[in-house]
Amino acid sequence: MTAAFSVAEKPCIPARTSHGHEMLSLRQLLTRAHRVEDLALPLPPAQSSLLRILTVITARLTGLDDPHLPRATWTRRRNEFLQAGRGFDPDMIGTYLKAHIFDLFDPHRPFLQDPRLRTQCVKRAGVNALAWGRPAGNNTVWRTGDHSDSTPHPLPAHEAFWHLLIHHYYGPSGRCSARTVPGFHPVKDPGLSSGPLRSTLSFHPQGRTLYETLLLHLTPSPGDTEDLDEPACTPDACPWEEDLPDLLAPPPPLTWPGRLLTGRSRHAVLLEPDPAGAHVTDAYLTWATFHPRQPATDPHHIIDTQPGKDAEQRDIPRRADADRAPWRDLDALLLAGDETPGSRRPTVFATLNDLPDTVQDHLRVRVCGFDQDPKVNNRLWYTALTPPLWNWAQSNDPRAAARIASARIAAESYAALLAKLTATAWQSTLNPRNNNTRPARHRRTKPCRWTRAALAAYWPAAETTFWELIHTGAPGDDIRPAFARTAVAALRTATRDDLIRHPYAGRALARAVITLRAAASDRPRTPGERRGHP
């Protein structure tokens, strides 16, 4: 019996419905999308990856992948789908799924895999190298568990699907299994290059149902912008919609939306199943292309601009940082480009102002981040969901958008001031005789345990302060005093015990409190004010 596991027919995608959490096949997910509330994958990078794949399938099912549709027509048609709310056409779903192979273990064209690796790779990577977080070789174990490199446990097929997605989008760079390709004779094996989303932060608009969410993920054809090929020159396709690529030929130009969202992987993977197809027992993992990476802008990334650098490094996606709370990126989503000189909002948010009011009022944002270094080390993945916020966008409520930006700037400025003052106070406490030998503004300071403890107490409280200011519509003059009180409370919490132990701590901390309170009246200008706007 040949092993088989079709993601189109086998339950493999966790979803949240009115009945609780259910495991659905791809067909069930698409057919019931208007009744499914949200995806519920336990691995945020897998959810972010799957959303990109589902976005392209949604474009195919709705015809909104037509590059020749005028912008106004495209917007009108999407709004018609949103207002109808009947879900996707089951016949269209059936036709699409029947036209392509979605079997993970198909002998000739396994889904998102390359069957040529069985003959081109001498060495297998092992199932632990496939499963993120398991120990494998010399890699760093960053998640705990009962796995070991010497006794790998088989991976359930549906979980292997999730890890397969993460490798294609967030995979590492570096050494891998050698791959022998006929006609290709490199001086050395090219090795892996990192996945297109590695170490980045993705922002996904989210509606009341998965059906709305997927429609909100669509963007109109960018034409000749965004480094994409002209639509008339190269037909758009996803990896499962075309033949295996010729590794010696340059990859086809990036096209919208298929190749942009699903065709930029740098990894080649092949899963080895058990006879029943219920588990994955081994895997091949190697490079998919030795050609240079094609420039592209993912529509779910905030782009940070760094003037003065060369073209390849000037615009970079915002990096995921487990120490940075997602609310600190809200102003980059809500403000127009001319109000945020150092960043650009994700492209997917450019068309949200054209949504029906009933959809716009409930629009939230799902944040998915994977804190990684650019090469192989992984730190933490995380996700967050904002409250409905698009009514605060600059085009809808300029005052609210400006208030959010001001609150974020104030929160970060007080964090920096708190770090500086705690370090200075700690030095003054340990060396009271040197208190007045050098002005504080010239004294070199470095983080200390007071700094770490104060910031650990400050940031969660600052988030509470931020949302209170936004929901209550507090005037701008109240923003800095609110964060001053938050910083003072964090300082006192962090130093409460040492205030008793160290006889000189009281005076040093009192100066820090005075400085924090005084800074509340020193209001920095907002980006709009720096440009001369009122």
Image (cartoon, helix red, strand yellow):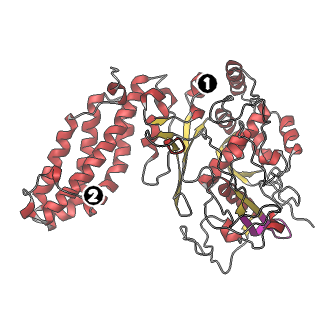
Q: Is residue 391 left or right of residue 161?
A: left
Is the Cβ of the residue at disc 1 closer than 8 Å to that at disc 2? no
Outermost bottom residue: 150
Q: Is residue 20 visible?
A: no
Give the amino acid type for the residue marked by disc 1 in the picture.
Leu
Q: Is residue 86 above or below residue 422?
A: above
Which quadrant does the C terminus fall into?
Answer: top left
Report crowding for label 1: few under 14, some 14 to 19, many 20 or more residues within 10 A (C-alpha). Answer: some
Numbered mark located on residue 451 in the image? 2
Name the element at disc 2: helix
Q: Position of residue 308 (x, y in %)?
A: 43, 40
Q: Is residue 105 left or right of residue 254?
A: right
Instruction: Report, in whole angstroms, how far the alpha carbon at label 1 lies from the one at label 2.
Output: 45 Å
What residue do we see at 39% from left, 33% from top? 404
Q: Is residue 34 above or below residue 74?
A: below
Q: Is residue 471 visible?
A: yes
Numbered mark located on residue 355 in the image? 1
Q: Position of residue 354 (x, y in %)?
A: 60, 22
* Rendering quarter of residue 55: top right
What residue do we see at 56% from left, 61% from top? 375
Which quadrant does the N terminus fall into?
Answer: bottom right
Q: Main secondary structure of the magenta part?
A: strand
